[in-house]
Amino acid sequence: MAERAAQLSVDGQTIDLAVLSPSEGYDAIDISALITEGYVTFDPGFMSTASCESSITYIDGDEGILLHRGYPIEQLSSSSNYLELTYLLLFGSLPTQSEFDAYKEKIRAETYVDDRLLALCATLPQHSHPMGIMCSLVGAMSAIFHHETDITDAASRDQVAIKLIAQMPICAAIAYRHSVGKPMLPAKPELAYGEHFLHLMFSEHEDDEVNPVLATAMDRIFLLHADHEQNASTSTVRLAGSTDANPYASIAAGIAALWGPSHGGANEAVLDMLAEMGSVDRIEEFVGKAKDSNDPFRLMGFGHRVYKNYDPRAKVMQQTCDEVLNELGVENDPVLQMARELERIALADDYFVQRRLYPNVDFYSGIILKAIGMPVELFTVIFVTGRTSGWIAQWKELVSEPYKIGRPRQMYTGSRNRDYVPIGAR
Ligand code: SDX
């Protein structure tokens, strides 16, 4: 029995509910037995609902803190790299050199261009949205690798994770090069993760080199997007995984959820918003629209369900933005200038201050990606590539222990029981 209990008094009866203490964050009131008392809770958008226990990532939204297995994102982004973080997310501790070398060897073994995925992509129209292509390619992986996947076997679960982490940058490059009518390059497993991705994306020839500053920035962007507790797409992956579904199919479901502009699609939406804004002269107009409760427009890249402070990833992203634009000699990029002025104006505006709306991870990522030469339609694909490690780590955490199928209840507001009326009598 938990040490503490909450009492819920309703309709003259008192219901005891256990209070659970996490290692960090809000105490949790266990309401799972409430249904036996004839009640359900109502929490649209899951504002106050913890859907699971997890030890992978912790966010303190008030303080703007993000920890992966206890390590602050600021330290990981300055001292680690994306592949090492994927190991940490999957296995719970930082690898020794020999562990990391063995892990990287497994990733390299899965780093190849799968001709079946290449052929599938070729069947899609050239103008297809890359996020739809990613859904298709990862969905196809569920078809191709289903019979060799055993979710009850730990080694098979790890193999799924390694294959997905290795294949995502290649799928992204397949999608992009198809969209611009360029033939795919062969994989170069010996390259570092971010470097390899930029090579597959933009190189004309196999021996072309990648700018090391851009390669480092790309790796850091993947690292900053790796995992983020039970966000909409991760919750989608967990819900699909809770039915014992194929893990590749569960990740494809996560890709679909991330596509929305309220979630991972925001980085693309930030650039579209800045393009529509056109100049600093129109910032006040757009801020006014964002503040108008009758206008559905929201300031893209601002606000967050959990962060009511600066998103710590946005701060690192802003530093990376400066590095990339300085390296490329475009530090006076007009879009960046507009973004900086928009941020300054919004952060001084009572509407945003009172609602604790700050720039989130998407606000600057789009500007960096644009400077690197990434087409806007690829921005969320970059998010997918980074977040795949978080999704599959969360899926692994779920299916590695006993779990229940996720099946929320509802508050029914439809018609009460009534008799069918024949069409002639309506
Ligand atoms: C990501 O969950 C995650 O962790 C996601 C993510 C991850 O790594 O997985 O961090 C990635 O999705 C980041 C968020 C990217 N989305 C955007 O940048 C789109 C713009 N942001 C908004 O759509 C919004 O802020 C959400 C969707 C992110 C959060 O929505 P909520 O939780 O409904 O917002 P809220 O409850 O904090 O809103 C409080 C008030 C409301 O106004 P009032 O009813 O109080 O008058 O703030 C307003 C909102 O209308 N508001 C905004 C706003 N965001 C919230 N007003 C103008 N512009 C905005 N961007």
Image (cartoon, helix red, strand yellow):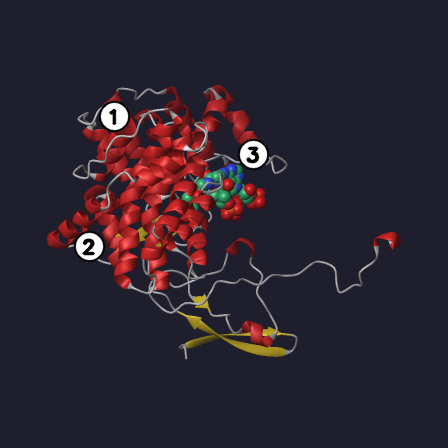
Checking the image for residue 203, the label placed there is 1
As helix, strand or loop, the secondary structure at mark 2 comes to loop
Which of the two discs, 3 and 1, sits closer to the camera?
1
Q: Which residue corresponds to mark 3?
A: 297
Q: Quadrant of residue 289?
A: top right
Q: Quadrant of residue 185?
A: top left
Residue 359 in the image: above or below residue 238 = above
Q: Is residue 72 visible?
A: no
Mark-to-mark CA distance, 3 and 1: 38 Å
Mark earlier in primary sequence (2, 1): 2
Q: Of 127 and 220, which appears nearest the observer?
A: 127
Q: Name the residue at 55% across, 58% down.
A: 43
Q: Is residue 364 left or right of residue 192?
A: right
Provide residue 78's location: percent of width, then percent of height.
21, 42
Q: Quadrant of the N terminus?
A: bottom left
Q: Name the residue at 24% across, 42% down.
A: 111
